[in-house]
Image: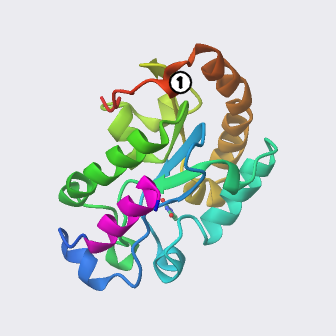
Amino acid sequence: MSALSELYQEIALCQQCEIAKYRIKVVPGEGMEDADLMFIGEAPGWHEDQQGRPFVGPAGLFLDELLASINLKREQVYIANVIKCRPQGNRDPLPVEILNCRQWLERQIELISPKMIVTLGRYSMAMFFPGKSISKIHGTDQRRDNVIYYAMYHPAAALHQRSLRQAIEEDMLKIPSLLAQAESITEAKQQPQQLSMF
Ligand code: URA
């Protein structure tokens, strides 16, 4: 069994938060184990909770479209969320839930060791760009320890607001050239990598 599959088993046993009691399925994440590009959303919604897979509802269909716009399929990237259980009624994640779940995301990042991490929405952005505002930094990147961090709006928000939709579509189109730059600065795949949450 791969290290990532073992991690999924550990995540499935997690009962640290109250919301674990109400989940149908835990949603650890999915995608290529050695993906260069990792997307981090917020939390599972109703569809994700039913299927145990990230971004499979309307926001996920839009994410698939955005990926297609840069000639990628979801199988070629890795998709995770800040928290792995659905908050009831699709409320925002609580700080304690984000804190409890952080260990899982950190271990996913360590195992996958992506060259580029794309944050989708405010909650994911706040982990890597603390104190920043998404309206100011979407479509911009920061580099730490050979990893490019890139902030985007959440596809669910962009689905319903025309101006955000245009912004997310444009921001997506910048990813291939950033990824190409990441490839040129990375020999780090072969080396143990320090996790870069800041
Ligand atoms: N929104 C998210 O942030 N994550 C999902 O998996 C689905 C919707």
Q: Quadrant of residue 174?
A: top right
Q: Which residues are magenta?
A: 2-13
Q: Quadrant of residue 11?
A: bottom left
Residue occupying image coordinates x 53% and y 24% = 141
In the image, residue 3 lies in the stretch drawn in magenta: yes
Q: Nearer the viewer, residue 133 or 86?
A: 86
x and y percent of residue 82 in the render?
38, 54
x and y percent of residue 89 in the render?
37, 79
**Mark 1 burial class by Cα count in 10 Å: few <14, some 14-19, many 20+:** some
Q: Amino acid at mark 1?
A: Asp
* Residue at the farthest top position: 185
Q: Is residue 144 above or below residue 138?
A: above
Q: Nearer the viewer, residue 4 or 71?
A: 4
In the image, residue 64 lies in the stretch drawn in magenta: no
Quadrant of image for the C terminus: top left
Q: In screen coordinates, is 113 left or right of 71?
A: left
Magenta highlight: main SS = helix
Residue occupying image coordinates x 24% and y 83% = 21
Q: In screen coordinates, is 72 left or right of 21?
A: right
* Residue at the farthest front position: 1
x and y percent of residue 130 in the render?
31, 32
Q: Nearer the viewer, residue 40 or 29?
A: 29
> Cβ(mark 1) to ligand 1 < 8 Å?
no
x and y percent of residue 68 in the render?
79, 50
Residue occupying image coordinates x 68% and y 56% = 75
Judging by the rendered image, the residue that carries numbered circle 1 is: 141
How is the protein colored in the picture? rainbow
The kind of secondary structure element at disc 1 is strand
Residue occupying image coordinates x 26% and y 76% = 19
Q: In screen coordinates, is 156 left or right of 165?
A: left
